[in-house]
Amino acid sequence: MLAPQRQAAILDLVRRHGGVRVSELVREFGVSDMTIRRDLETLADRGLLAKVHGGATIIGPGSTDEPGFAAKSVRQQAEKAAIVARAAELVRPGSAIALSAGTTTAALAERLVDVPGLTVVTNSVPVADALYRSGRTDQTVVLTGGIRTPSDALAGPFADSAIRSLNVDLLFLGVHGMSPRAGLTTPNLMEAETNRLLVNSARRLIVIADHTKWEMVGIATIAPLADADVVITDSGLSAEAQTQLAEEVGELIVVTA
């Protein structure tokens, strides 16, 4: 197992259990105590966990905490891959779609390079880059202007003005959190308004979010859960949460990583 893969697995264990011991990780991955300590140091330097004596614990997120794109990209990679594979099946050739910013939507963009005739509206620099790099001449990518945020989104008045006059068939929305009380949320106030306009521009709203987003609450609500026509998540979401979510949204799709 390569170091980045092992670190992603360690982070997943921390998130699932709230904390881990170095000794447990040594047994789990069959590597030295020093290797595990270096992995924990790397993850702590990225702000993904907190080192404690003999192990590491999860960092409790605040409502305005916003990890950067690179930090989020190592989280729940298997779950995101399964989610975007299912999401890509909903995209038809020749349609007009929008992709919000986020690591899950960026992964989806990589899957959409093979769909002919797409028009893609996005406020995400990585999404646009993935589609531009494909070199397809039959796809049109509309990248909004705006102020760049830690999640590599473009937000603010310029982005909002560009989106306000557009209409798309589908919006694939990545979110910071989902909860029955707060709905679909973000920790960034500028992104919240830009995402609301993306929601308004779309005939159907498809939320793509792994199980760790459940009961996470950012400072700003984008939309209530009931506005989602489809939510695609993974089987790491508890049965109780699946029931709650299914009662709120149009359709719940649960994939296995």
Image: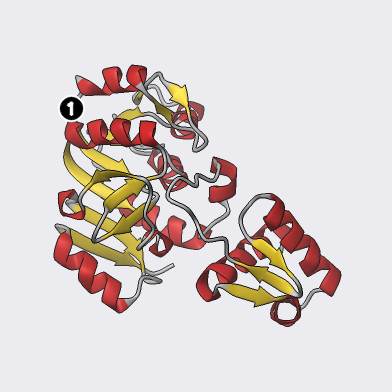
Q: Nearer the viewer, residue 158 or 174?
A: 158
Q: Please tell me which residue is depicted at 34% across the width and 75% down the height of the picture.
A: 238
Residue 26 image position (x, y, % from top left) = 76, 78
Q: Nearer the viewer, residue 13 or 52?
A: 52
Q: Quickly name the residue at label 1.
A: 167
Q: Is residue 50 left or right of residue 96?
A: right
Image-quadrant location for residue 159 = top left
Q: Is residue 89 visible?
A: no
> From this viewpoint, is residue 216 visible?
yes
- Front residue of this view, candidates 198 and 178: 178
Q: Relative to 84, is 167 on the left or the right?
A: left
User: For the residue carrying disc 1, how many other residues have a C-alpha within 10 Å: few (<14), some (14-19), or many (20+)?
Assistant: some
Is 104 placed above or below 189 here?
Answer: below
In the depicted structure, whether residue 84 falls above or below residue 156: below
What is the quadrant of residue 55 in the picture? bottom right
The number of numbered discs placed on residues in the rendered structure image is: 1
- Horizontal and vertical percent position of residue 82: 41, 60
Q: Residue at x 40, y 50 (%)?
A: 176
113 left or right, relative to 230: right
In x, y percent, where is residue 251? 17, 60
Look at label 1 and name its amino acid: Asn
